Image (spheres, rainbow, N blue to C red):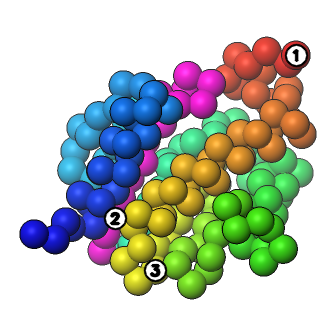
Amino acid sequence: MTKGSIGVVRDHLQYYADRGVFRGFSEPRNGNFKFAWLVNHQVELAVDTTKHILKFRRLLGGVSPNSAMYRDLKRFIHDRHDPDLPLHRRIDRKRAEASCANRGGFVSVSLNVKNNHYAYGVKCIVNLVHEVFLHLREVYPDYLAENFDVPQE
């Protein structure tokens, strides 16, 4: 029996949870997953198989849409498609496209999955968000300290 797109996403996220990458992994509603990750922050990944979108909603708070930080985040995410990046860090536009949006100071990170590549999409969005937090730690440590209680050392 073939697994549906939600099932593929669920299995891949469960794999991360089983390895201890995520804590408190749950699916309160079909296609909406919650777990603690990166700096013990509770995140929500919403899956919309009609629009083929994986989205970390309200991932970052307190980010002005007009700020240099938000412009930098948009550029950083856009640059994950750069063919000069190593394969393991690059997002293949033929299979998925990453973006971010800012609503009311909350940044969401999305991945548009193409041609039903949901397994690839889960891997990409998890790696992308991990890289975003590494980038924030390097370039905006004050933001992480203020918003996520991350030590600056």
For label 1, the SS is loop
* Residue appearing at x 45%, y 28% in the figure: 20
Instruction: Calculate the distance from the C-alpha at mark 1 to the C-alpha at mark 2.
Output: 38 Å
Name the foreground residue: 102 vs 139: 139
Can you give x and y, in whole percent of width and height, for residue 43 in the image? 48, 36
What span is colored magenta in the figure?
A: 36-50
Can you give x and y, in whole percent of width and height, for residue 61 in the image? 64, 37
Question: To which quarter of the image does residue 34 belong?
Answer: top left
Instruction: Calculate the distance from the C-alpha at mark 2 to the C-alpha at mark 3.
Output: 13 Å
Task: Tell me which amino acid carries mark 2.
Answer: Asp
Residue placed under numbered mark 2 in the picture: 48
- Picture layout, residue 106 above or below residue 112: above
Q: Is the C-beta separation of discs 2 and 3 under 8 Å?
A: no
Can you give x and y, in whole percent of width and height, for residue 99 in the image? 63, 65
For label 2, the SS is strand
Label 2 packing within 10 angstroms: few (<14), some (14-19), many (20+): some
For label 3, the SS is loop
